Image (tube, rainbow, N blue to C red):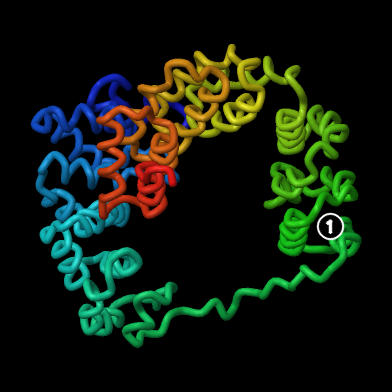
Amino acid sequence: MSNEDVMRYARYDTVEGLLQRGRGLGAIRAVKDPTAAAPYVYDSMRRDWRWDTFDDRSRYLARLIRDLKLSPAPAVELLAGSEQDCERATGVLELLALAGSDEAREGLRSHVVVGAHWVFVLESVSALWPVEWWEDLGEVARARIGEESQRPWFPQPWTRFGIEVRRPDGAPRRPDLSARGDEDLLALLADPRTDNGLKCHALGELARRPPVEGLISLVPSLGTPDGRLALPLLWRAVAGLGALAVPAARRWEVDDRAWLARLGADVLADHLGPEIIPRLVAELDDQWRTRTWCGPFLAATRLARFGAAAAEAAPVLRRFWLRTPHSYERADYLRALAAIAPAGLDRAHSESLWDCEDSARLRAIAHAPDHPENLERIAVLRDDPMEDPQVRAAAEERLTPPG
């Protein structure tokens, strides 16, 4: 997506718009007025308001349904919709079941018995629920699996039920390159007869090693045959070169091939000094002007290393944090602001204790002020059976007295 209007998001400062974006402030306001917020909560479940598949909403919506004392029935009904509808509903219902909702638990179990998307639902709940909650569905699974045109891929729960899963027998095995020397790997990359799959494998191996300077001269030749893209894993391998790649990156940046020019610009942005700040700020400004929601976190992260010297970026970073529908990047904007212009972030950190993203809640647990309401919220996160284990552990650590 390239423009916010495509999804017709509500204003970022309304309850509806906040809930669509997964903002913590939306959850805080919703709890204060459940009746007014309920339609927006259900709408955020029925429609996929995520800007990108990396965005997380399941835990956020499940918590809202529980905290607002709403019925999970609309989520159960959504299981019978499209595959995407079923996936969203399953993510919410399986968490509600962990929090004690019998209706959510039975809704999912019933779908395994008679629903169209039963394979996905059974695989999902078996990965999250205690085994005793789904093990008795083995007879149903053995009876229904014959209706499917293909056997499932994942071992769990099928092998437990004695159901054979598909094997990638026809997939070629990648050779083990770990014992090959650096020069051998470079020779593979330089040989025009080496297929791109093996070149990608070699790049992945080089990315795990100390910098191999010989890779630098080969970079311009490591694009796809049509010249439009870099080979997968090239970015990672070049990142491992660090500042060694800077002189070559100055040449790459002015190359006619867009992928090589972008790679050169990225290397320079990662390693040049304060002289790169105006360019990064201009990049952020342009992304804000075009409402480019995916990607600004890169410029934000690069600016953060300059601290207060990059203070001119603070206003646009605040706008991105407040308004982006791409919740996955929100914690990166807050992290950059904390490095560049930390004054006045107490409220943002406090709000983020309610955010939809694990990364935002983790940051908030570490940095929210020691106000009683914040500590109470952190205790809720620590004890919530729906919460991510890493977040629960961080909350436990924050609340544990020193020594």
Residue at image position (69%, 52%) is 233
Residue 83 image position (x, y, % from top left): 30, 57
Q: Is residue 371 left or right of residue 169?
A: left
Residue 286 image position (x, y, % from top left): 57, 18
Residue at image position (32%, 64%) is 128
Q: Which residue is mark 1?
A: 189
Residue at image position (90%, 50%) is 214
Q: Does residue 173 appear anywhere in the picture? A: yes
Looking at the image, residue 104 lies above or below residue 45? below
Q: Is residue 287 left or right of residue 262?
A: left
Q: Quadrant of the N terminus?
A: top left
Q: Does residue 58 appear anywhere in the picture? A: no
Q: Looking at the image, which is closer to me, 233 or 68? A: 68
Count of marks placed on residues: 1
Looking at the image, residue 227 lies above or below residue 18? below
Residue at image position (91%, 60%) is 183
Looking at the image, residue 191 lies above or below residue 288? below
Q: Dot 1 lies on which element?
A: helix
